[in-house]
Amino acid sequence: MTELFDIKISDVSTTLLLTLYCHALESQSKNPILNDPKAVELTQKLNPELLKSKDRFLRRLAEGKSDKNLVVHISMRAKRYDEYVRDFLKRSPNGIIVNIGCGLDTRFWRIDDGKTIFYDLDLPEVIAIKKKFFIENERYHFIASSVLDDEWFERLLQHGKGPYMFVAEGVFMYLPGEDVKSLVLKLQSRFPGSELVCEVCNDLWLHEPFKSMLNFKMQRQLHLGKGTSFNFGVKNSKEMEEWKRGIKFLDDWSYFDSAEGKMGWIRFLSNFEFLRKTQWTIHYQLN
């Protein structure tokens, strides 16, 4: 557990700070992949709190010390998810966006077209921190809940039938597999025709020796805490279609699909399918 503003958050939830600081650092770089002035503003407010933390990982974030490759990859992912949302809103101008496991993400300000209805959903302790910096309004709302507690569905349904897009960036991998499947099937049932954009990892990384390698990287090299581990994965992009009739694969995206120059030599790994689909994003329609 980590304490922030006298609010205790789990090791997994602490990744929200890493994501935020990656956005801010990239936004201040030359030729930024992502333009996120709200993230820069928020990190400047967080720095005094993090600098006095006993947690070395948090102090390093405040000092602007993050893995450069991670900054690039997380910023690329945020940019692509923003594109998914903008495309959905072009096709469905009255659409409603639900940002699952939102952390301290500032996507609403990056994609807002002046009429977007947007929900940020995360655990109560995360939303409590978010409320210290952001205010809800008639189009921007918070839901303080576990994504697995489906009582939050009723809150959304007050806005009618949608259409909805559910965005799960960097979330599903940390949840038990049976819970992810249950959630997706419930979304399909309660929000028919909705779209889901979710990040997944390859099922191979949930088994030894790959799982130990991944845990070492996250827990020891990135200092994300002992409780940070992947628990859900898929074998291929169309696997969820097998869960129930009506779940339709639309497209997928990998970091290696981008020609982003800041990836450097890592781009050459795209020639190996196993590595290209280690961690990637899948887009579904839940009919």
Image (cartoon, rainbow, N blue to C red):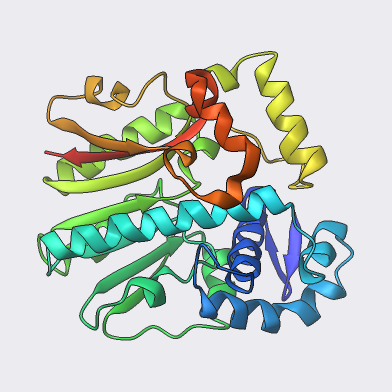
Instruction: Give the answer, above or below, for where 65 lies relative to 72.
Output: below
Q: Where is residue 45 drawn, in percent x and y?
A: 68, 84
Q: Nearer the viewer, residue 274 or 177?
A: 274
Does residue 198 lie above or below 229 as drawn? Answer: below
How many labels, in total? 0
- Image quarter for residue 75? bottom right
Q: Position of residue 168 (x, y in %)?
A: 40, 49
Question: Residue 81's image quarter?
Answer: bottom left
Question: Where is the C terminus found, in terms of image quarters?
Answer: top left
Residue 148 higher or lower than 114, as above or below: above
Q: Quadrant of residue 155?
A: bottom left
Q: Residue at x 84, y 66 (%)?
A: 59
- Residue 41 percent coordinates (x, y): 60, 83
On the question of residue 152 being in view, the answer is no
Q: Residue at x 45, y 50 (%)?
A: 169
Residue under the point 25% across and 23% down: 243
The residue at the point 76 percent across, 45 percent down is: 222
Instruction: Judge left or right: residue 67 versus residue 188.
Output: right
Q: Position of residue 120 (x, y in %)?
A: 40, 66
Residue 167 appears in the rendering: yes
Side (left or right) of 67 relative to 54: left
**Where's the N terminus, which quadrant?**
bottom right
Q: Is residue 125 above or below residue 266?
A: below
